Amino acid sequence: MPKILILGSKELEELLKPEVLIPEIENAFIKYSRNETVTPPRTVMWVEGNWWGVMQSYVPDCGVGVKVVSLIPQNPSRGLPTIQALVTLFDGLNGSPLAVMEGGVLTALRTGAASAVSAKYLAPKDIGPIGIIGTGYQARYQLRFVSSVYRSDEVVIYDVRSDQMKTFRAWAENAGFRVIEAASSEDLVKKSKIVIEASTTKEPVILGKWLSRDQHVISIGAHAKDYRALDNEAITRFSKIVVDSRKAVLDETGDIRIPLEKGLIKQEDIAELGEVSAGYRKGRESDELTLFKSVGLAIQDAAAAALAYRLAKSKGIGIELEL
């Protein structure tokens, strides 16, 4: 058996910088929309009221990635991350196991990179504040990656948990951002050019009546069929709705499934990020209101894991173990 490379969160942070990860994730989305990947639907189960997923994908030139991930909102009160995961990487040709990686950071990194790809094609041309609803674990990665494409140094934040806002504010200011604490989600939306929803909400926190032209909304929450982060009015106001996967969002989030079933939008209104990146569908064309809705795909894990593996091997980073 070949040796297996073990990479922890610190190594992944060191290896997967925005400038190297964003192009890799964009390329994975293009391959996905060209049907070049093998990406079965994730297996989802609810354990003690909490969401668990098993995600797997083959991405050409990357290999096979398999992730087991849990999302447990009560974990911060236990001193644990909301999202915990392990990612395994296998050789796509001979099946040999190559690496095991800490999946919480990998998930946050690749999710931030996907949001940055959406900003590359859909963000307003004028630079203004980046707003973030939900200042938990994912928020700092969203800000790091999106701001590397949309060069704003101002962030507006809102969270129902004041302690989380305080912690995030200290981190963001230390990273060089000017931070404004919003009084509510409505206040945040009205003050921001890009609005990032990174919460664990089950009910809408972004209402259509708050939105204005020339904004881009990124929603990575509302991860179940009946959960909503955006109300019906918001969905109908977007001139462009872009998703990571049409099938995945229809199966896994109420934000798209419910308006579609109500006839408020049509399937042809929904573009995939890979289609936009490849030039098959148009990105931002003018002062318009755009949405990127993401539930996360296994292609992102496989692509990020493969990149981390290649870089770690070339730099001699990580621990190798023989099974």
Image (tube, rainbow, N blue to C red):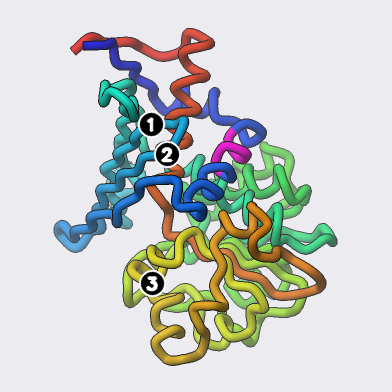
Q: Which mark is residue 250?
A: 3
Whether residue 133 is visible here, answered yes or no, is no
Type of amino acid at the residue the image marks with label 2: Val
Determine if the magenta segment contains residue 24: yes
Residue that lies at the very extreme toward the left in this rendered image = 48
Give residue 244's position: percent from left, percent from top.
Answer: 49, 59
Q: Is residue 237 left or right of residue 97?
A: right
Decide which of tag 3 and tag 2 comes sooner along the chain: 2
Decide which of tag 3 and tag 1 comes sooner along the chain: 1
Type of amino acid at the residue the image marks with label 1: Gly
For the C terminus, give its image quadrant: top left
Q: Quadrant for residue 196, please give it.
A: bottom right
Q: Quadrant for residue 228, please give it.
A: bottom left
SS for callout 3: helix
SS for callout 2: strand
SS for callout 1: strand
Magenta-tinted stretch: 21-25
* Structural distance between the alpha carbons of marks 2 and 1: 6 Å
Whether residue 110 is visible here, answered yes or no, is yes
Q: Which mark is residue 63?
A: 1
Give residue 254's position: percent from left, percent from top.
Answer: 39, 76
